[in-house]
Image: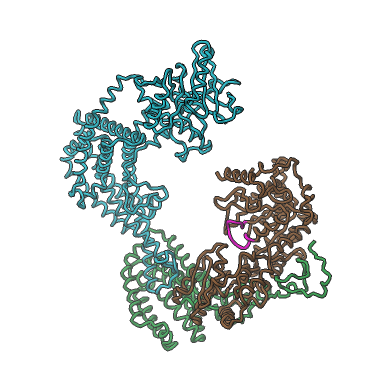
Amino acid sequence: MACRGGGGHGQPPSATLFRVSPGNLSTRRTLTHNICMVSDFFYPNMGGVESHIYQLSQCLIERGHKVIIVTHAYGNRKGIRYLTNGLKVYYLPLKVMYNQSTATTLFHSLPLLRYIFVRERVTIIHSHSSFSAMAHDALFHAKTMGLQTVFTDHSLFGFADVSSVLTNKLLTVSLCDTNHIICVSYTSKENTVLRAALNPEIVSVIPNAVDPTDFTPDPFRRHDSVITIVVVSRLVYRKGTDLLSGIIPEICQKYPDLNFIIGGEGPKRIILEEVRERYQLQDRVLLLGALEHKDVRNVLVQGHIFLNTSLTEAFCMAIVEAASCGLQVVSTRVGGIPEVLPENLIILCEPSVKSLCEGLEKAIFQLKSGALPAPENIHNIVKTFYTWRNVAERTEKVYDRVAGEAVLPMDKRLDRLISHCGPVTGYIFALLAVFDFLFLIFLRWMTPDSLIDVAVDATGPRGAWTHQCPHRIKRREKNKMFKAR
Amino acid sequence: MLLKAFFPTCCSSVDSGLLVGRWVPEQSSAVVLAVLHFPFIPAQVKELLVQVQRASRVGMAVLGTWCHSQQEPEEPLGHFLEGLGTIFPHDPWLQLCRERGSKSWSCKVSCQQAPAALGVPCEDQVMLIFYDQRKVLLSRLHPSAVLPDHQAGDAPASTRGLAAVFDTVARSKELFRSNQFNEGPVRLSHWQSEGVEASILVELAKWASGPVCLLLACLLSLVSAASTCRVFRLWPLSFIGSKLSTCEQLRHRLEHLTLVFSTQKAESPAQLMRKANMLVSVLLDVALGLSLLSWLHGKNRIGQLADALVPVADHVAKELQHLLQWLMGAPAGLKMNRALDQVLGRFFLYHIHLWISYIHLMSPFIECILWHVGLSACLGLTVALSILSDIIALLTFHIYCFYVYGARLYCLKIYGLSSLWRLFRGKKWNVLRQRVDSCSYDLDQLFIGTLLFTILLFLLPTTALYYLVFTLLRLLVVTVQGLIHLLVELINSLPLYSLGLRLCRPYRLAAGVKFCILEHEAGRPLRLLMQINPLPYTRVVHTYRLPSCGCHPKHSWGSLCRKLFFGELIYPWRQRGDKQD
Amino acid sequence: MCAQPVTDTKEAKWQKVLYERQPFPDNYVDRRFLEELRKNIYARKYQYWAVVFESSVVIQQLCSVCVFVVIWWYMDEGLLAPHWLFGTGLASSLIGYVLFDLIDRGEGRKKSGRTRWADLKSALVFITFTYGFSPVLKTLTESVSTDTIYAMSVFMLLGHLIFFDYGANAAIVSSTLSLNMAIFASVCLASRLPRSLHAFVMVTFAIQIFALWPMLQKKLKACTPRSYVGVTLLFAFSALGGLLSISAVGAILFALLLVSISCLCPFYLIRLQLFKENIHGPWDEAEIKEDLSRFLS
C-alpha cells in the first residue's frame, strides 16, 4: 500500500519488538505504544473532538509513540492520508447515517478494522466520543480481538428522556469491558460513571487543552469607543441560541454603544435574524456565519467580552480560547464550566436571560471602570492552565496502566456482559459478542494474520517519517498522487 | 544517453552522402530528412540549408554522414567522411554505415567538444528508427494529451518527442518542394511523389476553384442579406422562423455554405478538414435530396400521399374523440369528479370538431401544397426531413393545444395545492429569504384556504388524468419529431470526409506510433521500424464532428421528469429561460 | 501507573477544578464525588381536583367532535332540517358573541384592537364563501367511496384532537393545523349530505363548533372557572345524550372514555409520581424557563 516502498528495514516486526525501545528514546521513555485513535469525527469535519484527537496524536507522536487514526471517508477524502509528522489517517469507506456518524450493524466494520489493527500492530485502541458509532464498534471488536481499549467521553447526557435512557444503556454495554475511560471534566466523570454504571477508579479526568500560541490577544484590533460582545458557537438549541435571542434586545436597548459579533452557523440562526430585524439592530449585531478554526482568533480579538450561553457543556474549549485572547468571559453555570476557569476570569450566571444580562452588565461595568486586567495579563495566566503536552503526558500514564492489565478471556467477558448490563441487554449483547468472535475466527481462517502485510511505521520508535530525507517524502507524495487517481 | 536516429526508409539504399535533418536536443534524437549526395560544394549546401530553414522555420543542419558501401569498404572514403565533420560542425556527429552484402548496419556517434574518452563510439547507445517518410509527412498526429479521455498513463514527454518528430517531417515539405525535379545545384535523395500528371489536374482544380468560390460567395451573401431583410424581423415572421425547424435547417446550411465557399484560405489542417467535411456533407445531402425528389415526382406518388394524408388526419381525430369519450366515462375504473370531467371532455370535443372541419376545408389544396413542398427536397434531404417534421407538428396541432390546456390547468392546481398545503400546516413561503416560515393566519384566511385546498385536492385526479393522457400523446409526437431531428443532425454533423480518409488512407490520421524490431543484436545498433497507428473511428467522429444546429433543448432525464411532474410545458425547441444541463 | 507518588495527599484538599495541577492521580475519587447528585427535584405535587379541572379542556374537545358527528348523522339521516340547525347555530353564535365581550367587559377586544367591522367582515366571508362553494362541495366527492371519506374524516378528526392546543407547551401542538384538519373533515363529511344547503349548513356549523366555541371556552375558563365547569358538564351530557339516541353502546363507550380521562387518568398520574426516580446534577441540560417568544412577537 501507500508506504510499502518507504521503509527499508528487513526483519519482520512483531508485537513484542515494540516493547524494546530504541536507544535514542530510552532517555525519555521506556515504554512505547502503538495507539489507534478511532472516531467518526475527524478532519475535514471541524469541532472539539476533532481537534482533540489531532492535537493529542501529535503530542503522543512527539513523545515517541506510534499513532494512527481511523475514521470514515468524507466525500472524496478516502483511503490513507498522511498528516503533519507522519500521522497516518485511514478514511474507511463506511456509510454515513446521521450527523457524520456511521451506521452500525456491529459486524460490517470488523473485517476492515481487524485488517488495520493487525497490519499496524496496534496494541491500544483509543475511541473518542459517545456519539460515534464507529468508536463503539472499534471497542467491541478490539475486545473480541483481545486488545486493550481506552475511551474518551466528550459529552454530557441527561437521564430524563427516552432517547437518553436508550443511549445510556448502549453506553453501559460499550464501556462494560473497556479498560479505562477518560473524561474531560469532573462533572463529565460523574455523568459517565452514572450513565455507564462504572467503577469510578477506572475513570480518569484529563481536561482538553488549547494551543495558547494560537490564541494571543491583540488589543489594537478592538475599538475602545464601543463595547463589543463576541459569541462563537454553533447556533443550535444546546448552545443556548434561544437565550442569546433574548439577551441581544435587552442589552442593546440598555447600552447604545454596544455591538454583538456572532460567529457560527446552525438551524437557530433564523431566530437571531428575526430578532435583529424586529429590533432594527442590523448595524449592531453582526452575524458572521460559519467560521473556520483559524479565523476564530481573529474574531475573538475584536471583542471585549465573550458570552457563552450553552445549556450543557462537558468542558467548553470556547471560553478557554476566549480567555486566552484576553476577553472577559460571561458564561452560564452548566456542566463542567465552573471547573474550567478560576473565578476572577469568568462571570458565571444562571441559564436565564435575566441572570445572563446581569452578568453582562457586571462585566460592562467592570470594563468601563477599568477594573478588568489587561488582555496580556489574562493571556499569561490562562496559557499555563491547559497544554496539549500535559494532556499527552497524562494520557500516556493511562496507556501505561492499561498496557499492564490482563485482557479478559471470552468466557469472562460474556459473564461480565451478562452480569453488568442487565438480564435482557446482557444476553443479547453476549450473543452478539459470540457472533463477533465467530466472525473473527472465520476471518482469521480466510486471511490468517500471518498473511496480512505489516505496514511500515510512519511514527513511533521505528518511524520512517523524517524531514531529513526528501526523496522519501517525494516518493510518498508520488504514492499519494497515484492513489488520488 | 540514448541517441535516437530517425531515418527514412526510402533513403536506405541510396548512395553515400551527408545526412541532412534536424537535431532535437530535448529528446536527443536526430531526425534525418534527406541524404545529400556527392559531389557538393559546402557553401552551396549551407545556402540550401539556410533557404529551407527560412521557409520552414525548422533548424536544419548536416547531422552526419551516410556511407553505403557498394563494393569493398574503401578506406579513403571513410576517412573523407570523418573529415567532413570538421566542415559541418555538429555536436553529435552521426556516422551511419551500411554494408552491401550483409544487411548489417553500423552507427557511430562522436562528440566533438567532449574529451576523447567520451568520444569513443559506443554503438549500443544509438537506436536507429526507420520511418516511412511519405506517411509521416502526410499524416497528422492527434495529440493524446489534448484529449482528456485518453489515458494519461504513458509519460507525456514521449508524446511530445513524437510530436516534434512529426512536426519536423511535416515542415520539411519545403525541402522537397525546392528540390522537386532535381534541378538545384545539390543532389538530394528523399521521398519523391509520383503521379505528376494527376497533380496537374489538381493544380487546374485549384486554379479554377478561386473564381467559383468567389461567385458562390457573392450569391450566398445575397441570399443571407435577403434573409436578414427587415420584413423577416417583424413579430409573427421572426417567431415562426425561430420555431419551424425548416427555417433553422436552412439557416444552418447557409452558414455551412458560406464557410465552405469563403475565399479565405484555411489556416490550419483542422480547419481545412472541417471545410472538406462540410462540403462532403452538403453534397451528400443534396444528392440524397435529389434522389428523393425524383422518387416522389415519378408515378404520381404525391397524389397518393395527399390522398392518404387527409384520411390519416381524420382517423387521428376520430381516435382522439373516442379517447375523450372514454375519459368522460369512468376510465380504467378511476373515480373522477363527474362535473369537471364533463366540462373538460366537452371542451376538448369541441376542439376536435373545429379541427376536423379545418382539415376538410384544407383537403382540396393539400396535393398542391405537397407538390411544391416536395420541390424543396432539391435543397437537400435534411431540408425535406425538416419540412416533414414541421408538417407533423402542424397536423398534430390539436394534440399540442390539448396538452397545453391540460398542463396549464394541472400546473395551476399543483402550485395552488402546494401553497395551500403550507397554509394548511400554518406555514408560508418567504419570498425574500427563499424558505418556509411559520405564520399565524387569520381565521377567515384559514377557512377559505382549507376550503380551497379540499376542493383542489378532490379535483386533482381528474385534471391529472387528462394531463397524463395528453402528455403521453404529446410525448409521442415529440418523440417522432425527435427521431427525424436525430436523422437530420446525423447528416449535418457526421464528418464524412474524415471518415472516408480514415477508411482509405488510415495513416493520414495518426493516433500514435508503434515500433517493430528489425534487428536486435549485441554490438549493433537496435533497429526499429516506426509504423503509424491510425485513429480509432470513435475518436475521428469525436474530433471532427461538425457543430450541430443547436436549436433543440437537451433535457436531462431528471429535469424532464421534474418538469412533467410540475406540469411545466415541454417544447421541442429551446426556451429562453431554459438552463443548459 | 496513574498514582503519582505524592506525599502530602492528606494535607492537600481536593478541589473540583481543572485549571490547577493537584497532587492527586487523574483517577482519584474524592469523598465529594457525586455530592451534587439530586433526585426528583422537579417532581411536581399535583392536586387531584386541579388536574381534573385541567382535563376538562380535553373533555370539551372530545365532546365537540362528538356533537359534530352526531349532528352530521342527524342531517345525513334527514332527521334534522338544515334551516333549523342554521337558525339555532346563528342564534347561539350571536349569544356567544355577546357573552365573549361581556365576560371580560371588552378588555380582550381592546387589547387585540379588533373592530366589530372586522368581525362582521369575517362572518360575511364565511357565509358567502361557504354558500358559494356549497354546490361544488355537494358534487365534490360523489365518485369517491363513502368508506374512503369516512376513513379520511376519522383520520382528520383524530389529527384535530392530537394537534389541538390544550395548553401544553409541546412541539407537536399546532392550533392552525388542528383547525385545518377539522375543517377538512367537515368538508369531507358535508359533501356526503343530500343537498347543497345541507353542506352549507354543516360547514358553517363546523366553523362555529371548532373555531368559535374554543375561543369562548378559553375566555370562560380564564374568567369564570365555576361557570366553565358547569358549561363543560352540560356540554358533555348533551353530547352523551345525542350519542345515546344513535347508539347506546357508543354512548357507554364514550362515557367511559370521558370518565377515564377526567377521573382515572389524573388519579393514575398522581399515583405514578411516587415511583419517580429522576437523577439530576450539574450535567443536566439547562432548561429555559422564560418565555422567549415575547422577544419575537
Q: Quadrant of residue A310?
A: bottom right
**Quadrant containing the C terminus of chain A in the rendered view:** top right
For this orientation, the residue located farthest to the bottom is C105
Boundaries of the magenta span = A40-51
In the visual, does A351 lie left or right of A36? left
Residue A366: within the magenta?
Answer: no
Q: Name the residue nearer the viewer: B231 or A51.
A: A51
Q: Residue B41: x, y in percent?
A: 41, 21
**Which residue is located at x 79 percent, y 74 percent?**
C12
Counting labels gives 0
Q: Which chain is cyan in the picture?
A: B
Considering only vertical position in the picture, is A79 above or below B304?
below
For this orientation, the residue located farthest to the top is B71
The answer to whether residue A367 shows anywhere in this view is yes
- Tell me, what hue is chain C? green
Q: Residue A78: x, y in percent?
A: 58, 49
**Which residue is located at x 31 percent, y 39 percent?**
B484
Q: Residue B497: x, y in percent?
A: 34, 31
Q: Residue B441: x, y in percent?
A: 41, 72
For this orientation, the residue located farthest to the right is C7
Q: Which chain is brown in the picture?
A: A
In the visual, does B295 lie left or right of A25? left
Residue A46: within the magenta?
Answer: yes
The answer to whether residue C58 shows anywhere in this view is no
**Which residue is located at x 51 percent, y 83 percent?**
C229
In the visual, does B222 lie left or right of A446? left
Predominant SS of the magenta segment:
loop
